[in-house]
Amino acid sequence: MIYLDYSATTPVNDEVLESFIETTRNFIGNPNSHHYLGVNGKKLIDAATEQIASILKVKPSEVIYTSGASESNNTAIKGICAHFRNRGRHIITSRLEHSSVIAPISYLQNNGFEVDFVDIDEKGQVDLDSLKSLLRDDTILVSIASVNSEVGVSQNINEIAKVVHSNPKTFYHCDITQSLGKEEVDLTNVDLASFSAQKFYGIKGVGGLIKKEKVAIDPLIHGGKSTTVFRSGTPAIGLIVSTAKALRLATEHQKENIEYVNKLSKLLKSELEKIKEVKINSNEYSIPHIVNISVDKIKPETLLHALEEKDIFISTQTACSTSTSSPSLSVLAITKDEERALHSVRMSLSHLTTESDIMTFIKELKEIIKKLGELYESN
């Protein structure tokens, strides 16, 4: 099997899985209980939280555990807008955001909020002048991700934050799901940040929201304290401890992993450039882990399933996209080319990917393009 869909989800690290199993087996008490089984569980969670906070350079009190990035995004966006709706009802975002950002913002728009989309340039970079011009006295939230999940374009989130905070009434939410473990992430000037453990070799079903102490939000889920008052539910000790382990392992080896993936990405792009039917949509601002291409005249789903028959796995748009037949909004926003947006697919790499994987993928891709091209011509 050749897996080239790491940006959708990563396989769980064996050490992380062992940590989850051991913790779940040995710490059976509810961490909110006052008997020693609960107290011991809470101590373990507190230690895990200290570790996560140390890695992200935030305070332990600023870490909120969720079921994943989608819940974190919804909690941040709806939480800010619910709490500050009397201050203003204006939101700014971009057309490069994940569906778990766009959907809650669309929900709020349908319930009385105004939404503006910041301009982006031909390389997918947020136009800071456009952002500044969109800020109003009643703007309460700007939500722009650190890395786009389809094309992989990385933003300068600290420069964005400076513009956002030129209006003292506005908060900056950043989805760092595609950044964490892949590039350096500085949250100094970010008010809220979402992430998911499954993107850095952790277990599915757990993530986090960093909410700075100065920021107030209304909870999305009510009914008890949990680890904070901002998200109710019995704390999942095994998931929390394993997330801390996954994040530590991912960041410990981040530098060498980035260097390795960068070499693989250059190899992949150089081989793709030799195929005349292929256009590369990712650019110099994209992280090396994500390579997005468009293949002339071939539907993404057709290409995906043809590769699947060869035991090679890629992605069309993002795994959370609500439609596979519509054009990729991210590719469209950057290329301004609907045909490219309609025919785009994504390969995402990892330190687990090999050069052999890349060359086998290229070989099979060429054969599939030739075969499907011949079928297209005959029809």
Image (tube, helix red, strand yellow):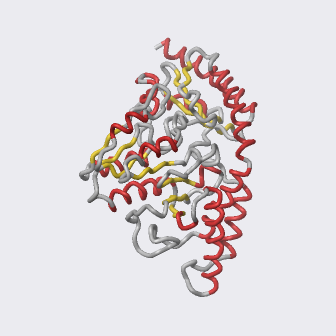
- What's the residue at 65%, 80% (across, down)? 40
Q: Is residue 218 above or below residue 310?
A: below
- What's the residue at 54%, 16% (across, down)? 373
Most distant residue in the top direction? 377
Q: Is residue 358 left or right of residue 69?
A: right
Q: Is residue 33 left or right of residue 271?
A: left
Q: Is residue 50 left or right of residue 304?
A: right
Q: Quadrant of the N terminus?
A: top right
Residue 38 found in image quarter = bottom right
Using the image as rendered, state which of residue 217 and residue 324 is in the foreground.
217
**Which x, y percent locates residue 148?**
51, 39
**Which x, y percent locates residue 353?**
71, 38
- What's the residue at 63%, 37% (across, down)? 289
**Which x, y percent locates residue 70?**
47, 53
Using the image as rendered, state which of residue 273 and residue 225 is in the foreground.
225
**Which x, y percent locates residue 140?**
34, 52
- What's the residue at 48%, 19% (across, down)? 297
Residue 358 found in image quarter = top right
Q: Is residue 270 above or below residue 54?
A: above
Label total for image: 0
Q: Is residue 178 left or right of residue 343?
A: right
Q: Is residue 124 above or below residue 370?
A: below
Q: Is residue 225 above or below residue 141?
A: below
Most distant residue in the left direction? 112
